[in-house]
Amino acid sequence: MPATFQRRLLPLVLVFLSLQVAGAGTQIFRVATYNIENYLDAPSGRRPAKSAEGQAGVRDSILAIHPDVLALQEMGSTHALFRLQAALKAGGLDLPFWEEVDGFDTNIHLAVLSRFSIVARRPHTNENFLLDGRRFLVSRGFAEVDIQVNPKYAFTLIAAHLKSRLPSPLADEEEWRYEEAMALRRIIDAQLAAAPAKNLIVLGDFNDLKDSKPIRAIMGRGRTRLIDTRPAEPGSGITWTHFYAKEDLYSRIDYILISHAMEPHWQRAETWVLSSTNWSTASDHRPLVAGFAVEHR
């Protein structure tokens, strides 16, 4: 079977399997996150434009996981987002609803694509903190949207891309990332204080390891502690999401976290990291996805 035909057939096969697993009256949907590494139309600052090969790799990786809701990090212009959206639709994945958040960093942005309606948007572009006596803005902001899956079920998605692990002359990069994580946690706390039983997903590139201060801050404690879905390669348990070529280091720095209200709907068998031979053509990250089963009748 030609590779091109296989690529086009895969999304249809995944949809068919979902319907088989879900059964009558139940709907399975997938939520994914993916850092697409400088998906830019043109060079910006020190960031190069995405090559045609890289763009095709991103498209193919997304088609392989076939998400219903997709959070993207390192997205370039809105034009670049629309171009990716059109490429996915041509490949059989229509995600017509979208959101893009422009933070302090003008080169790369957060974006969300969705098959379901985005019924509310609360972009966080002015979150700030004091560090070493200086006022900093959260570089990429946070995307927050409410998504209506069906008449009976909705959830809130918060997407983030925290400070990288690269050293900065402005401040200690780990403390910087921790302060951004605390800003994110304050938003989470506000949501769960207002609605303790809220269906909430917090996801993205958090740029740190699971036992680090920033990740512990985002996870929280007690009744409002988030649940780490910990996607892994099917059958292997391998969880790494990022490759740092300079140090030849594979690590898990991308996450899909959920509130306790979403846990009964979470499908572990539908939660995984994409494993493919050409993943690095697209990005230095791999996409991860979590599945959920909800009533739709």
Image: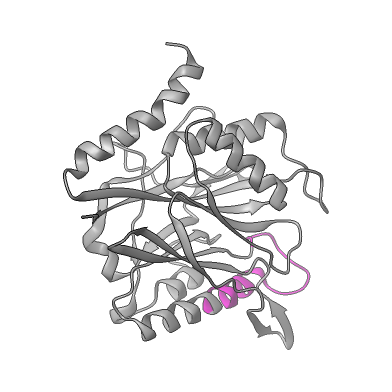
Residue drawn at (64%, 60%) of the image? 164
Percent from the top left, x then y, of residue 21? 20, 40
Give the quarter of the figure containing the C terminus. bottom left
- Left or right relative to 32: residue 244: right
Q: Residue at 43% x, 53% y: name it.
A: 116
| Nearest to the observer: residue 130 or residue 32 | 32
Q: Is residue 129 above or below residue 205?
A: below
| Residue 179 is a magenta residue | yes
Would you place residue 240 above or below residue 218 in this image?
Answer: above
Q: Nearer the viewer, residue 66 or 44?
A: 66
Quarter of the figure that contains the N terminus = top left
Q: Is residue 258 highlighted in magenta?
A: no
Residue 246 seen in render: no
Tell me where the magenta segment starts and ends, as one range. 164-182
Left or right of 283? Residue 291 is left
Residue 272 drawn at (x, y percent): 36, 44
Q: Is residue 107 visible?
A: yes
